[in-house]
Image (cartoon, rainbow, N blue to C red):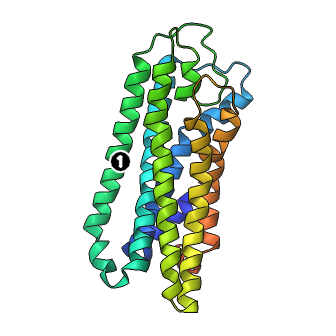
Amino acid sequence: MGNVVILLTITYSHLIEQPMYYFLCHLSLMDLCYTSTVVPRLIRDLAAAKKNISFSECMTQLFTAHWLAGVEIFILVSMALDRYVAIVKPLHYMVIMSRKRCNLLIAMAWAVGFWHSIALLLMVLSLPFCGPNLINHYLCDVKPLLKLVCKDIQVVSILVIANSGMVVVAIFVVLIASYILILYNLRLRSSSGRRKALSTCSSHIMVVVLFFVPCIYTYVLPAGSENKDKEISVFYTVIAPMLNPLIYTLRNMEMKNAMQKVFAQVSL
């Protein structure tokens, strides 16, 4: 509901013209779609006595979840780029972050997410699986599936870490570095401009940390090791998408004003 409210508020207000809210609109759409691949099945399984999933459904969930998560990660990168340009190069902001370039960044996010996901799917489909066909997870993810493989998974585990773990770590480092540069450049701003920029950036940093830190824990450790993947993955599959609307609306006066205006228009 929170993500739907953000989608409608931005789409039916002047905020859609601003690159930051344009990206936020797409982030809310990704949160909505991503959780829809995980949470409905999780709720069903919690209520069911037998928690079965077919092989084709499992592969579909694996592909879709990684595709949408990949898109979400690169949207977060685009949002960091937008804030960097707005604060470090404010005079060139509208030229650099034109609508054409924003659309290109979104298209790249979908393309990169797709190639990441299809590479992971093709790798999993090439593996020989054997019993007991039971995974200790609420989600068909690559690491619990590797425990059902009938051959040495050392090489495959390294490929998974390279495909998911190292990519997530690299992007997280780039994002944190960009926000450090932003904070460094804020020292030249007035106190009011500094407060406004800090409020926006702190929201972005909270979202990035909530999403990336659990992802790094899950995908950097090798597949054979015993860890808390199932418990930790709740953070980036359920909690982070649920908190994103609260983080971006409660700390943003423009969003709250736009929500009131859209609500007033709808109620008339």
In the rendered view, would you say 240 is above or below 84?
above
Q: What residue did someone put label 1 on?
A: 110
Which sits in the foreground, 189 or 43? 189
> At x 48% / y 71%, what residue is drawn?
181
x, y percent for residue 55: 50, 17
46 sits left or right of 21 in the view: right
In the rendered view, would you say 230 is above or below 202?
above
Can residue 265 be seen from the camera position used here?
A: no
In the rendered view, would you say 153 is above or below 45?
above
- Label 1 crowding class (10 Å Cα cut-off): few <14, some 14-19, many 20+? some
> At x 58% / y 25%, what residue is drawn?
223
Q: In which quarter of the image is residue 251?
A: bottom right
> At x 44% / y 14%, what residue is drawn?
127
Q: In which quarter of the image is residue 97?
A: bottom left
> At x 46% / y 21%, what residue is drawn?
155
Q: Pick the quarter of the image with the N terminus.
A: bottom right
262 sits left or right of 238 in the view: left
Query: Which secondary structure lies at badge 1?
Result: helix
x, y percent for residue 50: 70, 18
Can residue 40 be seen from the camera position used here?
A: yes
Which sits in the foreground, 28 or 193? 193
19 sits left or right of 200 in the view: left
Disc 1 residue type?
Trp
